Amino acid sequence: MKIQGKTALITGASRGIGRAIAKELAQQGMDKVILVARNQARLQEVATEIEAIGTQAVVLPLDLTQTVEVNIAIAQTWKQHGPIHLLVNCAGVAHQAPFLQTKLPKVQEELSLNLMGIYSMTQVLARRMASKKEGRIVNVSSLMGKIGAPTMATYSATKFAILGFTQALRTELAAHNIKVTALLPSLTETDMTRNTQRFRWVAAMTPEKVAKVLVNSLAKESPEILVGWQSHLAVLGNRFAPRFLEWWLQLTAPRSEQPKKSIWSRGY
C-alpha cells in the first residue's frame, strides 16, 4: 500500500502505539490522519504535532463501545473528509491481575473494548471500503495473542480472538480488494505500562519502533507482523518447544501479589 495522498484512521491515537503510528504515517507522507480516542485534549495535542509535520489531522473523540455513536461519527467523517483507505485498530485496555483475583467488571471492560470496539469500527469502515473496492485494515493484537500470559488471562484471550477475527476477515474481504493484517508487538514502553508488574528478563521496545515496523510493512502482503526478535523467538519456542516455553513463562511471570498499577491501556 502506498500511503502518499491517502487517508488513515487510527483508534487509540491519543498515546502509546496509536500516537506513534499516527506520527509515523504523517512523516512518511500520509495526506490525512483521523485520530480517534476518548480524550479530546490529548487528541488535540497529537493533531498539533502531526500538522507541524505537514499532514492534515482530524480529531474524532469517540467511545468505541458505543456502537451507534461510532456508526454516526464514521458516516459523517466519510462524507466530510472523503474515503478512508487505512484503518488501524489500536485502541485496547488490559487489567493485570492473577486470575483468581480477577474482577468481573474489569473483564467485561476488556471484552467490550478489545473485541466489540474493534468489531464495530471495522464493520462500519469495511462496508464503505468494499463499496470503493479498496482498503487496508491493521488490527493490533499482541504477542499475548500467540502466547497466553499469566496475570493477563482476559487480555490474552481478547488478543487471541483478534487474530482469529483478522484471519477470517482476510479471506472474506479479499474479494473486495481489502487487505487485513495483524500487528503483534511485545511489551512496549508506554506511560501506562511503566508501573505494571513486568515479566522478568523481557526487554521493552518503544512505540516508535513498533510504528516504524508497521509502516515499513504496509507495502508487503504479510498476514501477521511480529515486532522484535523476542517475539520471533517466543513464537518459534511455542511451535517447537511448547513445554519449555510454559516453564519459562512460569519462571518469568509476575509474582502473585497485586501489581502497583492494574490497568494497561494502549493509547485509549
Image (spheres, rainbow, N blue to C red):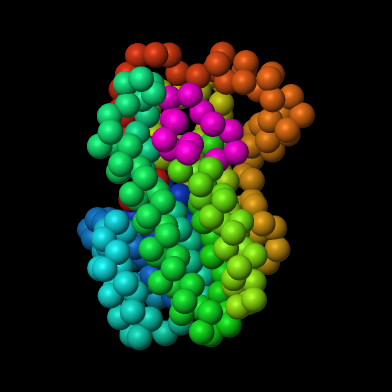
Looking at the image, residue 86 sits to the left or right of residue 174; the answer is left
Judge whether 216 appears above or below 172 on screen: above
Judge whether 98 appears above or below 36 on screen: above
Q: Who's the residue at 39% across and 23% down the image?
A: 99
Looking at the image, residue 56 sits to the left or right of residue 67; the answer is right
| Percent position of residue 108, x then y | 30, 41
| Percent position of residue 142, x then y | 53, 43
Residue 63 seen from this side: yes
Looking at the image, residue 23 sits to the left or right of residue 222; the answer is left
| 190, 81: nearer the viewer | 81
| 40, 142: nearer the viewer | 142
Q: Who's the residue at 57% across and 63% down the image?
A: 169
Numbered label tally: 0
| 21, 82: nearer the viewer | 82
Stretch of the chain drawn in magenta: 145-157
Q: Who's the residue at 45% across and 65% down the image?
A: 122
Check residue 210 for magenta coloring: no
Judge whether 72 appears above or below 257 on screen: below
Residue that protrudes farthest toward the right in the picture:
240
Looking at the image, residue 232 sits to the left or right of residue 60; the answer is right
| Percent position of residue 62, x then y | 27, 62
Residue 211 seen from this side: no
